Amino acid sequence: MAVNGRSEIVLANATATLLFSARTDVGKVRKVNEDSLMAQSPVFLVADGMGGHAHGDVASQTVVRVFDEHIEQNTPSTPERILDAIHSSNDAVRDLSAVDDYGTAVSGTTLAGVAFVDAGDDVGYHWMAFNIGDSRVYTWNGRTLTQLSVDHSAVQEMVDAGLITAADAEKHPERNVITRAIGADEFVDADVWLLPAAGRHSFLICSDGLTKELDTADIARVLAEHQGGPGFNDDPVEGAELGFGAAGHTVADVLVEAAIAHGGHDNVSVVYIEATLGQADDADQTGVTQERSLDDVENTNPRGV
């Protein structure tokens, strides 16, 4: 499945232009694709159904359905609506499990994404990043790929406690054990960040099927080779869908195919967004600019800030 396009969100005094490419693939080993994605302005997300759990594919699809029902297309959302969609997704996924289900019989899914939001008159337009589980949100500034989200996993807790290194975590036997998931508990605790939207921002959202096969340097190399847009062409070849360049491949295509070529041991999903609001020099081009918190929005310090 691939979703690619361009969206313009018209604001009072400016226009936010979004270019995006997205793709999900079952990979070489799995029989069922338990990943789902949403690339529909103003929300972009990846949900990875919990492998080995009942209805993992249905769980991730349920998240996409709930967000689609909650969020109006091509208009700024709000932090409150995004949080409501997250909590409603948790309720809907929990409804997939029977009362006496436990362990691997409980339906669940990760969730990671970004949304363009209006945080209020005193705060303004922001990109809101959110995460539950070990799917990831990265920022890309044209030179450096930075993981914004923090994995909710057993090995990340070991890294944070100083018991193992980040390199050890990549090969640890418990690297697939996650500590938070949509559907796992009655209340879901999401990590949330608000990043001022002015200027240019690029985001990569992915399931762990990508990061198991490609390291940060590999991913950054692909992004560097596609500077200036996620594989877009203002004049697509005849018969090509919007969002495909002359070669018919977007950034999402190239990353997914690279992960499959490296083994494709898991489902792999990628969403890539390049967004511009106002002039490109209106904000620091680092992708992660000044963080601003709201009293009524959950907030976690991003990596590197």
Image (tube, rainbow, N blue to C red):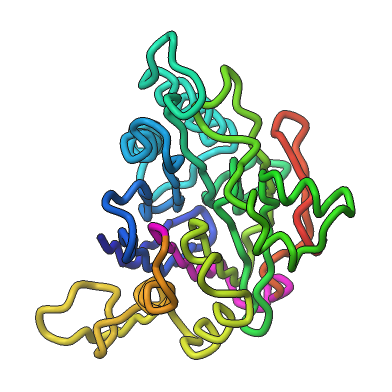
Q: Which residues are magenta?
A: 266-285
Q: Position of residue 233 (x, y in %)?
A: 31, 85
Which quadrant of the rendered structure holds the N terminus?
A: bottom left
The residue under the point 38% across, 13% down is 98
Q: Is residue 21 left or right of residue 186?
A: left
The residue under the point 46% across, 29% down is 104
The residue under the point 33% across, 40% down is 57
**Would you identify the image quadrant in which residue 289 lies?**
bottom right
Q: Is residue 258 magenta?
A: no
The residue under the point 68% across, 41% down is 191
Q: Position of residue 304 (x, y in %)?
A: 80, 64
Q: Is residue 274 magenta?
A: yes
Image: 240 above or below 74: below
Which residue appears farthest toward the front when viewing the image?
A: 173
Image: 107 above or below 23: above
Q: Is residue 172 left or right of residue 268?
A: right
